[in-house]
Image (cartoon, rainbow, N blue to C red):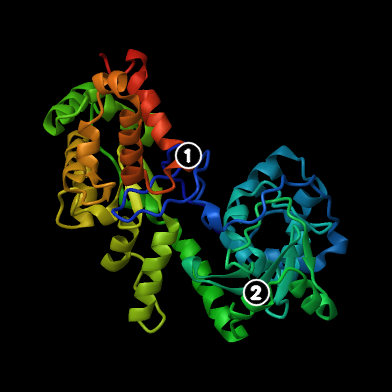
Amino acid sequence: MKFFSAKFIFLEKGPKKHETDPNPIAPVETFDRENIPEKEDVIGTAPAPKKLVLQKEENDKLFADFALFSEFDLAGFLADPENSELKKNFEKLPAEIFLQLDPESLRTLFLIDGKVDFRGNKEARQFVGLGDFFPHETQFLRVDGKIGKRSFYEKWEKVGYLDSDGNYLKILGGEKIEEIAPENLDAEIAKNNETEKFAEIQTLPKEEEEIHKKNFLENVKLFEKFSAEFNFSGKNAEKNLQKNIEKSAKNLGVDKKLISAILRCESSDFNFGAVRPEKHKFTEKLAALRAKNDGNLPDENSPEMSAARRESMSVGVFQIMGSNFKLAGFSDSAEMFQKMAENSENQFAAFENFVRKNPKKVDGINLLSAMKNISDKNAQNNPAENTKNFEIIAEIYNGPNFRENNYAKKLEKYFKNPDDGKILKT
């Protein structure tokens, strides 16, 4: 059985969260089926080690398991990992293949001399975790010196290892993984005063783990359907860009350079067909659908599943979340996606509605008021106040972690330097 990766239209900036109660994920340089979990939950960021050659005769179990799910020449690749063609094809293999391997085979493939090496496969790096590397019986691990207990990470419906503060221990490549001998466990935990904290972390029965692992694999396969929900067909979007910027600025009563700055933060290449799935939001919606259907999901092409996908992704040049369809002026997410895919004018209209109707406030100031406070005059006479308004815009539009990707600073920079006249002529 073969699997194929979906191709997504994506932005090259950090993920955006346009929700009235945002919880943005960590910024990334490019988008490859979005990184998980969120940055604040991640432990482990060391660089990947060098590739290791594996000989087929020494790893019959790995190759036999792998052959059940893919026709890729894994033995040839591991015998010559720098073969350009095999390397390129291995890096494109979807995560579903690896998630179906048993823990022993995964460790053989990706755990080299006790260190994690995903061999260039970005999907494995995104979706394969410690809970897949080790069986249920391995209850505690040490990851780069940090102790983790096997548990369930509800946010991603993912079995994995949590530290004593409840953070999911994410492996990104290069981390040192050690099993803790049972006779040393109590002493190791007590040494760091973590006994009581770990006692509060629940360990699931093996049968429940298997259900969650099955659900997670199903979720990953469903992630591939996102790109089919939004296909921009508008004409002359870039040609009409300046006109639309000026129109929206006039309609909202704000400086046109600010509209341009928001666009540059959201889509550096002004991509009206951009989609950005928020996988943790989709995971939440899938869990809710399973709860309503005795643990099962509706057909993947059903209206319920399409709505779940739409409401878990941000789209268009302004990257507005589908769950915000009412704020954007639509009756449901289906109408929102249909209208925003028709032309660039509808995307600007949706943005105007989102700004006007957004109820969130920071220090008593809403989004539209903060935008109206931005001006060249205010920048000159009261730069601190101007900077504060950029921060309010950033927090409402991008989320409370806007400082992690310097969103406010970028807004202010682009406002002062509006694309050097390439798009916005001042």
Q: Which residue is mark 1?
A: 405
At x 18%, y 39%, the residue is 352
Whether residue 9 is visible, yes or no, is yes
At x 78%, y 51%, the residue is 78
Instruction: Name the outermost residue toward the left.
Output: 251
Q: How many marks?
A: 2
Q: Crowdedness of circle 1 by 10 Å Cα count: few (<14), some, many (20+)? A: some
Query: Left or right: where does residue 93 sit relative to residue 25?
Result: right
Q: Is residue 38 above or below residue 163?
A: above
Q: Which residue is mark 2?
A: 150
Indicate the amino acid at tag 1.
Asn
- The answer to which quarter of the image holds residue 368 is top left
Q: CA distance from mark 1 to mark 2?
A: 31 Å
**What is the secondary structure assignment of the residue under circle 2?**
strand
The mark lying in front, picked from 1 and 2, is 1
60 or 126, nearer to the observer: 126
Q: Residue 58 appears at what percent x and percent y?
A: 87, 63
At x 58%, y 85%, the residue is 207
Q: Residue 81 appears at what percent x and percent y?
A: 77, 45
Q: Name the mark on residue 345.
A: none
Query: Left or right: where does residue 193 sit relative to residue 30?
Result: right
- The answer to which quarter of the image holds residue 182 is bottom right
Whether residue 63 is visible, yes or no, is no
Query: Left or right: where does residue 153 sit relative to residue 362?
Result: right
Q: Quadrant of the N terminus?
A: bottom right
Indicate the amino acid at tag 2.
Arg
332 or 262, nearer to the observer: 262
Query: Left or right: where does residue 81 sit relative to residue 6?
Result: right
404 or 178, nearer to the observer: 404
Q: Residue 18 appears at what percent x and percent y?
A: 32, 48
